[in-house]
Amino acid sequence: MLIRTHNDGLIHPLSSEITSPEAYATRRQLLRQWSAGAAAAGLAGWSQREAIAQSAAVSQAVKLAALPATQSSVQGAMTMEKVTSQKDATTYNNFYEFGVDKSDPARNAHTLKATPWSIEVEGLVKKPTRFNLEDVMKWGAMQERIYRMRCVEGWSMVIPWIGYSMSDLIKRVEPLPGAKYIEFITQVDPQTMPGVRGGYLDWPYIEGLRMDEAMHPLTLLSFGMYGEVLPKQNGAPVRLVVPWKYGFKSGKSIVKIRFVDKQPMVSWAKAAPQEYGFYSNVNPTVDHPRWSQANERRIGEGGLLDKKRKTLMFNGYEAQVGSLYSGMDLVKNF
Ligand code: MTE
């Protein structure tokens, strides 16, 4: 196993370095297939990877195609905590478009049509345009980042994501000076998303960030996890990951990014304004109206009755992001 140093001065191998030899051999085969089939070196076209992923899923050799990435040098991006098993991270999910039980997305999300995929950028930007995902994927260097994730429901995981800082996309599309917030609008398709027919939320699922939050280097536009492209239940082909906020701020299967001048109305605040605010920073001192937020259960660490761990302010990312909120009343702005 290769060991690398990184920005925390600690050591952690890349996901690709802790992959089983069998899976790694299969990935090398896939890489050869990509480079033989297309001129692309390293990163193959999305649709091609998707096709390979589908056939791989059928043959059960590997679940998804590899997504090459380098280790992140962003401050705080590589926690040393034990990584959650890939099985737990891909079978215990929230993705209401595919059902409300934790096991529903893994069971139902195979119907999501992740290719072809485009992202529309609209609102207060120089040139509102619809971009192909394959082009968007080239706007930043793919990095692996190991983030703690904390759900508002009181559980947490540690996940090796792949993607690039959202700021790379923002700079690329040239926001106008009036743009103060960004709205992330996700896919809604009753044909392929059975949960949409269930009416649990007012679709599409929408999330939002203030511009400085979106520009923070830790805010990740993610295309993969565990060395592979994103599984559908985790938000294929592209999602947001904001590690210091509760998991619901990380919208999955994004189709539209809108630059606006006013704080957007986001899905959970719309559904239950007393329970979920716009900011949703992980804050152990602000209880959810129906339960405490002081502790959390790390998925994979024992059962429901096992001792919980203390939840950290900003999910442990206070040194990196605390200054974004200086002077704000974080009880009022929950
Ligand atoms: N994005 C969409 N489109 N739909 C959803 O229901 N759920 C959110 C968030 N993004 C959700 C979503 C919630 S509540 C959480 S906790 C995280 O996704 C879960 O991400 P994970 O399943 O990859 O852990």
Image: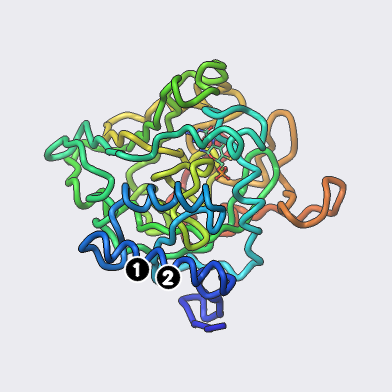
Q: Is residue 83 above or below residue 154?
A: below
**Res. 276 image quadrant:** top right
Q: Amino acid at mark 1?
A: Arg
| Residue at disc 2, secondary structure | helix
Q: CA distance from mark 2 to mark 1?
A: 6 Å
Q: Is mark 1 within 8 Å of ligand 1?
A: no
- Packing grade of label 1 (10 A; few <14, some 14-19, many >=20) is few
Asked if the residue at tag 1 contacts the one at tag 2, i.e. Cβ–Cβ closer than 8 Å, the answer is: yes
- Which residue is more in the foreground, 140 or 9? 140
- At horizontal 49% and vertical 82% (from top left) the residue drawn is 5
Ligand 1 falls in quadrant:
top right
Q: Which residue was labeled with disc 2?
A: 28
Q: Amino acid at mark 2?
A: Arg
Q: How many marks?
A: 2
Q: Left or right? Give the position of 166 relative to 245.
A: left
- Which residue is more in the foreground, 284 or 256? 256
Is residue 292 visible from the viewing direction of this image? yes
Q: At which x and y percent is residue 39? A: 20, 63
- Packing grade of label 2 (10 A; few <14, some 14-19, many >=20) is few
Q: At which x and y percent is residue 123? A: 21, 31
Is residue 326 visible from the viewing direction of this image? no
Q: Which residue was labeled with disc 1?
A: 32
Q: At which x and y percent is residue 114? A: 38, 39
- At horizontal 28% and vertical 59% (from top left) the residue drawn is 140
